[in-house]
Amino acid sequence: EAASFENIGDIVVNKIRAIEGIIDTKTLAGTKF
């Protein structure tokens, strides 16, 4: 459970992108880089 869209983006980057083979996702919700 994420507190904000930025947290959701962090989860996507840290968890989903960490899976080998996944380089680009289309689920970045307001992620700040």
Image: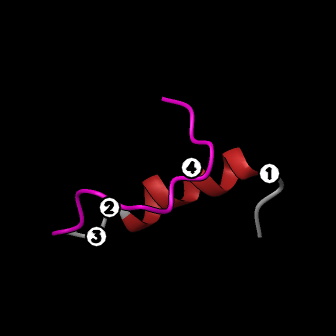
Q: Earlier in the sequence, mark 1 or mark 3?
A: 1
Residue beneath the point at 45% across and 55% down: 14
Residue beneath the point at 50% across and 62% down: 27
In this picture, residue 2 sits left or right of residue 22:
right
Q: Is residue 23 magenta?
A: yes
In this picture, residue 18 sits left or right of residue 27:
left
Residue at which label 1 appears = 4
Give above or below for 19 relative to 14. Answer: below
Q: Nearer the viewer, mark 2 or mark 1?
A: 1
In this picture, residue 21 sits left or right of residue 2:
left
Q: Earlier in the sequence, mark 1 or mark 4?
A: 1
Query: Residues in magenta?
Result: 21-33
Residue beneath the point at 19% across and 69% down: 20
How packed mark 3 is, by other alpha carbons closer than 10 Å (few <14, some 14-19, many 20 or more), is: few
Nearest the viewer among 29 and 17 is 29
Give above or below for 6 relative to 17. Answer: above
Q: Amino acid at mark 2?
A: Ala
Which numbered circle lies on residue 10?
Answer: 4
Residues at marks 1 and 3, CA–CA distance in whole angstroms: 23 Å
Q: Is residue 30 magenta?
A: yes
Which numbered circle lies on residue 18?
Answer: 2
Q: Earlier in the sequence, mark 4 or mark 3?
A: 4
How packed mark 1 is, by other alpha carbons closer than 10 Å (few <14, some 14-19, many 20 or more), is: few
